[in-house]
Amino acid sequence: MGLKQNLHNLKEKYKGTKMEQTFNALHTFLYLPNITTHSGAHVRDAADLKRVMNTVIMSLIPALIFGMFNAGYQYYGQINGFPQDGMAFLSTNFWNLDNLLVGASKILPMLIVSYGVGLGVEFIFATVKKHEVEEGYLVTGMLVPLIMPIDLPLWMLAVAVVFGVVIGKELFGGTGMNVLNPALTIRAFLFFNWAAWMSGDKVWVHGAKEGMMNAAGTDAISGETILGTLAANKPLLHSAQDMFFGFIPGSVGETSTLMILLGAAFLIFTGIGSARIMISSVVGAIVMGLIFNGLVDSGVIVEGSKFYSLMNFPFWQHLLVGGIAFGIVFMATDPVSASQTATGKIIYGFFIGFFSILIRVFNPAYPEGVMMAILLMNVFAPTIDHYVVQANIKRRMKRLKVKTA
C-alpha cells in the first residue's frame, strides 16, 4: 500500500511536466491503464491492451526457449558433427546447458536491443507528442529477435527497429493505426537493405564461417536452410521429424513447428488469436502446395527444371519449414493489420497461405514468401472488409425488398 501511495504522489509530482507520459507508462505497466470505461454501452471485462500483449508474449516463450537450445545445438553440430541420437526430442544432446548458454549469449542481446531501442523511440514520441506510451511494442519487441538470423549484427537490428517503429507505426498514428505489421516491416527493411545477412546460407547458424572444420577434419556444413537446400536442388539432410520438432537451421523462433503449435493453442484458448485466420492460411498453403505437386506428378514440371525440388516438396512439409507456421500464428493474426470481419478473416488468411507458397517457390532472392504474403494482405485487408460489409448490406437490402413487396 505504501508503494502504491508513493507512486501516486510521484504521479502528481510529474503531472504537467515533460516526464508525465514516461512516468504514466511505468505506472500502468505495474497497475491498471489510466483510461478505463466507467459508463455507457461498453463491454467491460478484465482484458486490456497490456494483458492482451502479455498473453501473446507468453505464447512466444516456448519458441524462444527452444530457439536458444537449437542455436547452441546447430553451433556445436557444425564443430563436432550432429550425434546420431541428437534427432530425438528428449535427447540430452539437444537439451544441454551448453546449447542453452550459446543460444542465450546470442539471442538475449538481440532482445535487449529490440526492446531498448524500440521502447526508447516510443518514449521519445510520447514525450514530444504528449500522449500515452502505448503497449503495442511489447509484442513487437519479442517478435523481432525471433524472426532474425542468429548472427545478425546488433547495429543492423537497432537501425531496423528505429525504422520500423517510426515509419511503420508512429507515422500512422501509433498502436492501432498502423497498416502493416511492425515486426515484418522491420524484417522487410533488413531484407531490402542487407539481403546477404537475411538470406545468406552462413548466417542461420552461429559461427558457421568459411573454412570452419568439423570433427572429421572436413569443412563444416554452411547451415543452409531446408528451403535453401531445395532451391539449390541438393539432397535433404533432415527428416520430416527434424523439421517438425525444429532440429534445423533457421531464424531463432521459426524452426520448431511443435513450439509454434503450442503457442497457437494458447492464443486460441485465450481468445487472442484468430482460429479463422490460422486455419484458412493453412488451407491456402495446402492448396498451393497441391497445385505444385500436381504439376510435377502430371509431368508438366520435369526433374532438372529450375523450380523442380521446391515444387516436388510434399505439400504438407511446406508447413514445417521456413517461417510460414510462425508467420501464420503470430503475425497474420495481428488484430490491427488483419481483416476484421469474420468472412474477411477467412479470405485474408487463405490468400496469405496461398501466396506464401507461391512466392516461396518463385522468389528469385531466396526461397521464402510468408513475409511478403502477410505484408501484401495487410494492404488489402481493408479492401476485403469493405467488400464483405457491402455484400452483407446488399443481401439485407434484398431481404428488406422481399418483405416489403
Image (cartoon, rainbow, N blue to C red):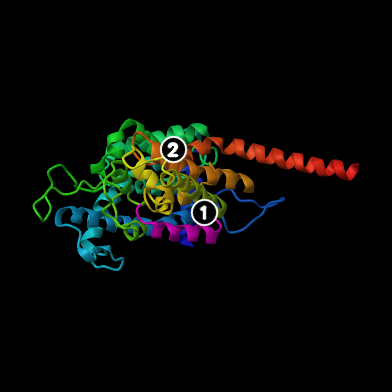
Q: Horizontal and vertical percent for residue 110?
A: 31, 46
Can you identify the residue that label 2 sits on? Answer: 372
Can you identify the residue that label 1 sits on? Answer: 52
What amino acid is found at the position of numbered circle 2 in the picture? Met
The relative height of residue 171 versus residue 339 in the rendered view (above or below) is above
Q: Can you say which quadrant of the picture contains the C terminus? A: top right
Q: CA distance from mark 1 to mark 2?
A: 26 Å
Q: SS class of the residue under badge 1?
A: helix
Q: Horizontal and vertical percent for residue 213?
A: 11, 49
Residue range corresponding to the magenta coloring: 255-272
Which quarter of the figure has residue 148? top left
What amino acid is found at the position of numbered circle 1 in the picture? Val
Which quarter of the figure has residue 182? top left
Q: Is residue 133 visible?
A: no
Q: SS class of the residue under badge 2?
A: helix
Viewed as shown, does residue 98 lie left or right of 309? left
Instruction: Name the one closer to the observer, 100 or 86.
Output: 86
Q: Horizontal and vertical percent for residue 257?
A: 39, 56
Please tell me whether residue 261 belongs to the stretch shown in magenta. yes
Label 1 Cα crowd, 10 Å radius (few <14 / some 14-19 / many 20+):
some
